[in-house]
Image: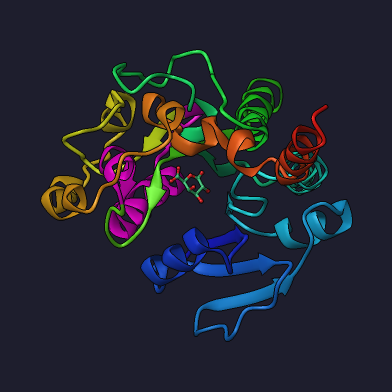
Amino acid sequence: MKTVLITGATGDVGSHLRRELAGKYQLRLSDRRPIKAASKGEKFIKADVSRMADALKITKGVDAIVHLGGYSVEGPWEAILQANIVGCYNIFEAARRNGVKRIIFPTSNHAVGFYRRDQTIDHRVYPRPDSRYGVSKVFGEALGSLYADKYGMEMFMIRIGNVNPKPIDKRRLSIWFSPRDLAQLVSLGIEKPGIKFEIVYGVSGNKRSWYDNSNAYRLGYTPQDDAEAWAEEVLKNEKPGNPIAELYQGGIFCAVEEVQNPAAPAKAAAKKARRKKGK
Ligand code: 15L
């Protein structure tokens, strides 16, 4: 049985993957946070991937790595830099030094989030990140390409949509990725012989997909699920959203500074005060 390292194992996607892959691989789990309880067939090592010593320790002696660890949404630059850029470099480089060839890198739909929703894109489009988080995923894809070309490593990049037991809104009807389809595509990334560098979309077989996922199908992916089964229920509860978010595939990540700019409330209060004083 292969030993597979999953970094970021306590996160959302990591938790689904642990459950779905149980019994199929020996799972070595790592995270900065402790896990509640390791099951049979799992071994947990606490690690911070932004430290090279930790990355070297957790990657030693595994057959493949699923590198989920890092910041999983938009965030401050310093946090993204350490967790996703330094962390990703450390894991890829530690894998190289430890002779681990195969890496499955869950990149994100946010690496291409500034494509419009009326466009269908495939794995060959130029990246159009919608956030610092998206940029960090493009960095991971580029680093994977370098390590494949220069060091002969085997890189399987999955641009994940949204992993959830069911699609939660209109946007997710196009990018939903069911846990069992996630497990199938990750297993394919671990098992498929002859991978050099591939980019695929991590989505179920959704009728409303924005992706031409023919590269995944060519490699043998046969999704079991389609978000359409929930479309009626989801659309019934859908409220009109931010117009920028509605236009682009990345949704609110494309407009997030507008919504989450921490200085915005203070600036608005100062403007109001100036108006009151008649300035
Ligand atoms: C992602 O890449 C995030 O990790 C996840 O938290 C969701 O926001 C997802 O994209 C999404 O776009 O729904």
> Camera-side residue: 273 or 222?
273
Tell me what residue is drawn at x 58 percent, y 54 percent: 63
Residue found 58% across the figure and 65% down from its top: 9
Residue pictured at 28% horizontal, 23% vertical:
212
Q: 116 or 180, which lies in front? A: 116
Q: Is residue 59 left or right of residue 165?
A: right
- Measured as percent of width and height from the top left, residue 5 is found at 60, 60
Q: Is residue 178 above or below residue 77?
A: below
In the image, taking residue 171 as reference, residue 234 lies left or right, namely: left
Q: Is residue 158 visible?
A: no
Write the residue at 33% across / 23% down. Answer: 117
Task: Give residue 122's quadrant in the image.
Answer: top left
Residue 174 belongs to the span the image colors magenta = yes
210 is within the stretch colored magenta:
no
Q: Quadrant of the C terminus?
A: top right
Instruction: Give the magenta-colored segment's residue range.
Output: 169-198
Picture layout, residue 98 above or below residue 20: above
The colour scheme applied to this rendered structure is rainbow
Q: How far across and down, in percent of the image, does residue 51 sit?
A: 86, 54
Left or right: residue 53 compared with residue 76: right
* Horizontal and vertical percent position of residue 267: 77, 38
Q: Please tell me whether residue 228 is drawn above or below residue 154 in the rendered image.
A: below
